[in-house]
C-alpha cells in the first residue's frame, strides 16, 4: 500500500529484522548493519535514511525526508541475512499551507487596522476595502459603516450606486475566499514549490470549469495572477495576488 506523505516533512516507518529462522527477531543491530536505497519515480536519488532500533525489540525505525514530489520507494537491506524491507510513499507539496500563511498575514493586517486604522497596510484586504487611492487614512466620521449609513439616508439618489459598489466589493471578497473559484495553470520550481498560478472566480457553481487550464468566460467575474518566490526550501520571500479582471 502506498502512503501519501508531504514533501519536506520527515516520513517515519518501522520494520522487523528476523534471524535466519525467519521467526525470531534480532535486536542490537546498529545503523551500519543496514544498507538503504531511495528511488524517486524509479530512479535512485541521494536521500539520507536513518535506521534505529525501537528499544531492544528487534523492531527498527526508518526516517527520511522527500525533497520533491513523486513516488518514492525506500529499500533497506539487512546485511547479515540479505533480506530486503521496502515501502512506497507518494509525496505531494502542501500548496494550501502557503495559502494559509498568506491568509494569516491578511488577518494580522486586519487586526492592525482595527487597533489603529491609520496604519492600513498597502495591498492588504483592509486597504482594498477602505481606500480608493494611495491615501492610507481612515476617518470614523466619514468612513465608518454608521457614517456611510447616515450619508445614504441623506443622499438617497446615490444609494443604488453605493450599494452596487458594495455588492461588487463583497463579490470580490467572497471570490478571494474561493467561492465558485478555480486555481489552475500552476508552475513549480525545481524543488516542487509553487511559483505561479491563475485564480478565476465565477458567478455560480454551474459556471466553474470542470477541467483546469481552459479559457472559459461565461459567468467569469474576476481573475488574479499569482506569483511566488522562495529562498531555499519552503521559505516564501514574496507572494503576490495581482488583480487582472
Image (cartoon, rainbow, N blue to C red):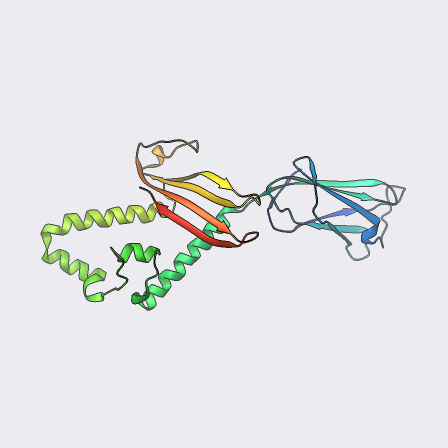
Quarter of the N terminus within the rendering? top right
Q: Quadrant of residue 149?
A: bottom left
Q: Is residue 103 above or below residue 87?
A: below
Residue that lies at the very extreme toward the right in this rendered image: 21
Please state if 64 lies on the left or on the right of 8 as rendered.
right
Residue drawn 14% across the image and 59% down it: 151
Residue 62 in view, yes or no: yes
Please state if 90 lies on the left or on the right of 240 as rendered.
right
Q: Is residue 187 above or below residue 28?
A: above
- Tally the numbered discs: 0
In the foreground, 19 or 137: 137
Residue 203 in view, yes or no: no
Residue 111 location, x and y as percent? 37, 63
Residue drawn 25% across the image and 46% down it: 168
Residue 37 location, x and y as percent? 75, 42
Residue drawn 73% across the image and 48% down it: 14
Q: Is residue 25 above or below residue 147?
A: above
Q: Quadrant of residue 179?
A: top left
Residue 91 location, x and y as percent? 60, 42
Q: Quadrant of residue 210?
A: top left
Quarter of the C terminus within the rendering? top left
Residue 10 location, x and y as percent? 65, 51
Please state if 134 lies on the left or on the right of 104 as rendered.
left
Q: Is residue 76 above or below residue 100?
A: above
Please state if 98 lies on the left or on the right of 70 as rendered.
left
Amino acid at each position: 500500500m502506498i502512503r501519501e506523505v508531504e514533501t519536506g516533512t520527515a516520513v517515519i516507518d518501522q520494520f522487523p529484522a528476523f534471524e535466519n529462522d525467519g521467526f525470531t527477531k534480532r535486536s542490537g543491530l546498529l545503523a551500519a548493519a543496514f544498507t538503504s536505497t531511495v528511488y524517486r519515480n524509479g530512479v535512485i536519488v541521494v536521500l539520507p535514511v536513518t535506521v534505529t532500533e525501537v528499544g531492544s525489540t528487534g523492531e527498527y525505525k526508518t526516517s527520511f525526508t522527500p525533497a520533491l514530489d513523486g513516488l518514492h520507494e525506500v529499500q533497506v537491506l539487512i546485511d547479515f541475512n540479505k533480506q530486503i524491507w521496502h515501502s512506497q510513499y507518494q509525496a505531494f507539496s502542501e500548496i494550501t499551507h502557503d495559502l494559509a500563511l498568506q491568509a494569516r498575514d491578511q488577518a494580522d493586517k486586519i487586526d492592525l487596522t482595527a487597533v489603529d486604522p491609520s496604519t492600513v497596510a498597502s495591498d492588504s484586504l483592509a486597504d482594498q476595502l477602505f481606500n480608493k487611492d494611495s491615501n492610507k487614512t481612515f476617518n470614523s466620521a466619514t468612513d465608518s459603516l454608521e457614517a456611510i449609513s447616515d450619508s445614504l439616508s441623506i443622499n438617497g439618489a446615490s444609494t443604488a450606486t453605493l450599494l452596487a459598489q458594495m455588492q461588487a466589493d463583497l463579490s470580490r471578497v467572497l471570490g478571494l475566499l474561493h467561492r465558485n473559484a478555480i486555481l489552475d495553470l500552476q508552475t513549480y520550481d525545481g524543488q516542487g514549490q509553487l511559483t505561479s498560478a491563475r485564480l478565476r472566480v465565477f458567478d455560480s457553481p454551474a459556471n466553474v470549469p470542470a477541467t483546469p487550464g481552459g479559457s472559459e468566460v461565461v459567468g467569469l467575474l474576476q481573475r488574479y495572477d499569482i506569483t511566488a518566490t522562495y529562498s531555499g526550501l519552503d521559505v516564501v520571500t514574496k507572494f503576490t495576488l495581482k488583480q487582472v479582471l
